[in-house]
Amino acid sequence: MFGDKKYGVNMFFYDIAHGIVLLGGSCPPPVKLTVDKKPFKNDILDEGMIIVGNHVSFKDPWYYSAVFSNRRMFFLASELVMKDPIRNFLCYHAGCIKIDRNIADIAAIRKATQTLKHKRAITIFPEGTVRRDEEQDLTEIKAGVIFLASQTGVPIIPAYSLKPRHWYNRRTVVVGRPFRISDYTDKKFLSVPEMDEIAKALIGKINECKNVFDEVTGGE
Amino acid sequence: MDILQGIKEAVTDAFGDDMDLTKITPEASLKEDLGFNSIGMLAMAVSLEEKFGFAFTNDDFTGITTIQDVIGIIESRQK
C-alpha cells in the first residue's frame, strides 16, 4: 500500500524518516573533507559499504546521512537505543537495524548482510557507545564490523567528526579512503584474533581522519 | 560428520590455532572454560552452518551455555 517493503523496512516510511534525518543533518550543512584535505564529493563507491566513525553524539547518524546524502543509509543500533516502543518505531523506520550486544545476534547480522548485498550503506559506530572523552584517539573498537565486512566483501569507509563548539557552527566530517579486508587477507572466514588484528589497522585509518580533522579545525 | 569433531573444527575456525582443542568436551562451558564472546559465537555459528548445512536463529543462542547445548541444536536440526 505504501511502497515496497525491503530488508524488513517499509520504504515509504523509511524515505520520510530518512528525509527528516537528512534535513536535521544538513542544518547547517556539514563541511565534508577527504583525508587529502580536499572536498569530499560523495561519489566514491557504487556498492554496499560500511561507514565507521567515532561516536560523540546522538546526532552523529544525522550528519553521516548528510555526508553520504546520495545513499539510503541504514544504521546498526544497540538494543538500548531502541528500548522503548516509540523510539523503537522511529528508529526502525529510519533504517536502524537493532543488534543485541548481549547475545550472538545472528538475525541482525543477516539483516545487515542482506542490506549491504543490495548495495546499501550501513553506518556503524564500533566503539559501541557515545564517548564523552572525545579528544582521545580511538584505541578499541568491536570486531563485529570486521566480521560483517569479511562476510559481505564490502569496503569500510573510515570517518571522523566532533561536535562543533556551538550549535550553529558547521560540523566538519573527514572521510577516509575505502578500507578493504582483502587488502589484509585472502581469507573469507576470519578468526577472532585475525579480526582483532585487522580492527587495529582500521583504528589507525580512523585516527588518520582524526589527525586531518585536528589539523583543519584545530581540534574543535 | 561427527558433531563434536565438527564443533572442534568450527572453534578452530573461529578462534585460530591457539585454542586448546582438548578443552572442547560436551561439558565445557562456552564462556567460562572456552572464553567465548558474542563475536566468537557468531564466527563459530557461521562455520557450523557451512559444515552442517543449516541456519542458526537467535532463539538457538538463548540459554546455551555448554558445548553439549550446541550439539543438541545440531542434532535437532539433523532430524
Image: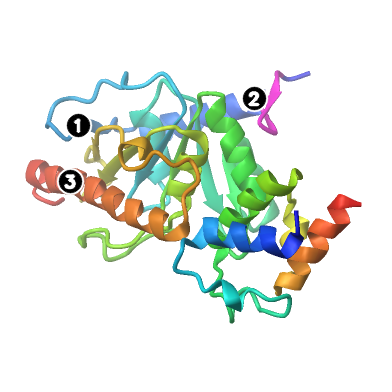
Residue B18 location (% of width, % of height): 44, 68
Q: Residues within 10 Å of mark 1 (few under 14, many from 20)?
A: many
Whole-number angstrom distance, CA of label 3 to CA of label 1: 13 Å
Left or right: where A211 falls relative to A26: left
- Residue displayed at 13% across by 51% down: A219
Q: Mark 3 or mark 2: name the one nearer the start of the chain.
A: 2
Left or right: where A8 falls relative to A28: right
Secondary element type, mark 3:
helix
Name which quarter of the figure residue B63 lies in: bottom right
Residue behind mark 2: A11
Secondary element type, mark 1:
strand
Q: Mark 1 or mark 2: name the one nearer the start of the chain.
A: 2
Q: Can residue A133 be seen in the rendering of this structure? A: yes
Left or right: where B65 falls relative to A212: right
Residue A47 location (% of width, % of height): 44, 22
Chain identifier of the residue bearing label 3 in the image: A
- Residue displayed at 71% across by 71% down: B67
Image position of A48 with respect to B70: above or below = above
Tag 3: amino acid: Glu
Determine if the magenta segment contains residue A186: no
**Span of residues in magenta:** A3-10
The numbered dot on residue A208 is 3
- Pointers 1 and 2 in contact (C-beta within 8 Å): no
Q: Residues within 10 Å of mark 3 (few under 14, many from 20)?
A: many
In this view of the protein, which residue sits in the foreground, B21 or B49? B21
